């Protein structure tokens, strides 16, 4: 029984995940943001997605959903690798680009499921017509590739949310205003005209180094990638 126009996702466990000492990515900021939102009583204006972890894992971020974009082997690695057993997976970690920016953190798979399921669940509620807007502060991990961790991102929840929207909508416009180019999302849809990706980002000698103004898509996706590089 939804009453409002905005759906809001927040997992109370998000603040307990920790990348590494001195790592710039801090999921605790998401919990702090949620606290500010509630202190200002903004929660009066939205409905909150209230899911327990089993429900999230079984439906919104199950194997079928995650491998709609990512490779089976890549998801299996995220599911099984831990700081304690990582020595047994060094070859895969190297191949899938797990470096200092994407460390093997405690409860890695749980963290990925947490932020990814929020984006997929929100997209599902939007495409079913229950809401017009959705918010997931923990999402937006736009650098992850099909079989590659990159730039603090392990699972690309943006791509998975778009795939969810495409079940209902013929076309989706993705707008990315992060300071870094949205390379993972652009690459995922570079050859299709069903998704237009539009990225505003800092360019020249800056991670990830992609997003040139002349990168506009290929084949059916020609002119469906828009890049706005900035100094």
Image (cartoon, grey):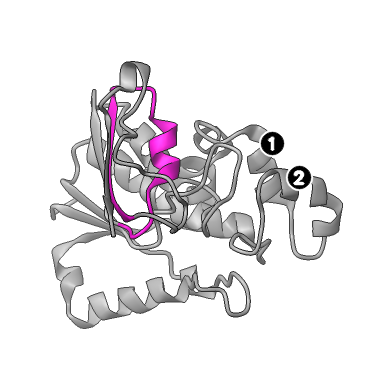
Residue 46 in sight from this viewpoint: yes
Q: Position of residue 117 (x, y in %)?
A: 44, 49
Q: Position of residue 3 (x, y in %)?
A: 13, 54
Q: Is residue 206 above or below residue 131?
A: below
Whether the magenta-drawn stretch holds residue 199 is answered as yes
Q: Position of residue 15 (x, y in %)?
A: 48, 74
Question: Which region shows up in magenta?
Answer: 178-202
Q: Residue 59 versus residue 210: which sits nearer the camera? A: 210
Name the disc covering residue 73, or none: 1
Q: Residue 171 versus residue 150: which sits nearer the camera? A: 150
Whether the magenta-drawn stretch holds residue 114 is answered as no
Q: Give yes or no for contact between labels 2 and 1 (Cβ–Cβ under 8 Å).
A: yes
- The tag earlier along the polypeptide, 2 or 1, is 1
- Residue 18, by quadrant, is bottom right
Residue at image point 54% right, 40% down: 62
Which residue, given by chain and number where applicable, does mark 2 sit on? 92
Q: Position of residue 38 (x, y in %)?
A: 24, 77
- Residue 10, by quadrant, is bottom left
């Amino acid at each position: 029984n939804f009453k409002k126009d905005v759906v809001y996702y927040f997992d109370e466990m998000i603040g307990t995940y920790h990348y590494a000492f001195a790592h710039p990515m801090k999921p605790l900021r998401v919990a702090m943001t949620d606290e500010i939102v509630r202190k200002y009583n903004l929660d009066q204006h939205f409905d909150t997605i209230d899911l327990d972890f089993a429900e999230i894992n079984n439906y919104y971020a199950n194997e079928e959903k995650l491998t709609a974009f990512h490779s089976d082997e890549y998801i299996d690695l995220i599911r099984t690798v831990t700081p304690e057993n990582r020595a047994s997976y060094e070859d895969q970690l190297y191949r899938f680009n797990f470096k200092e920016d994407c460390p093997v953190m405690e409860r890695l798979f749980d963290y990925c499921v947490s932020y990814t399921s929020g984006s997929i669940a929100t997209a599902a509620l939007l495409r079913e017509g229950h809401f017009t807007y959705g918010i997931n502060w923990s999402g937006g991990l736009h650098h992850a590739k099909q079989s590659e961790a990159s730039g603090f991102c392990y699972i690309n929840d943006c791509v998975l949310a778009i795939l969810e929207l495409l079940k209902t909508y013929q076309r989706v416009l993705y707008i990315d205003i992060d300071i870094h180019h949205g390379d993972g999302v652009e690459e995922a849809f570079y050859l299709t005209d069903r998704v237009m990706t539009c990225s505003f980002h800092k360019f020249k000698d800056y991670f990830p180094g992609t997003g040139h103004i002349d990168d506009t898509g290929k084949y059916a996706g020609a002119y469906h990638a828009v890049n706005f590089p900035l100094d």
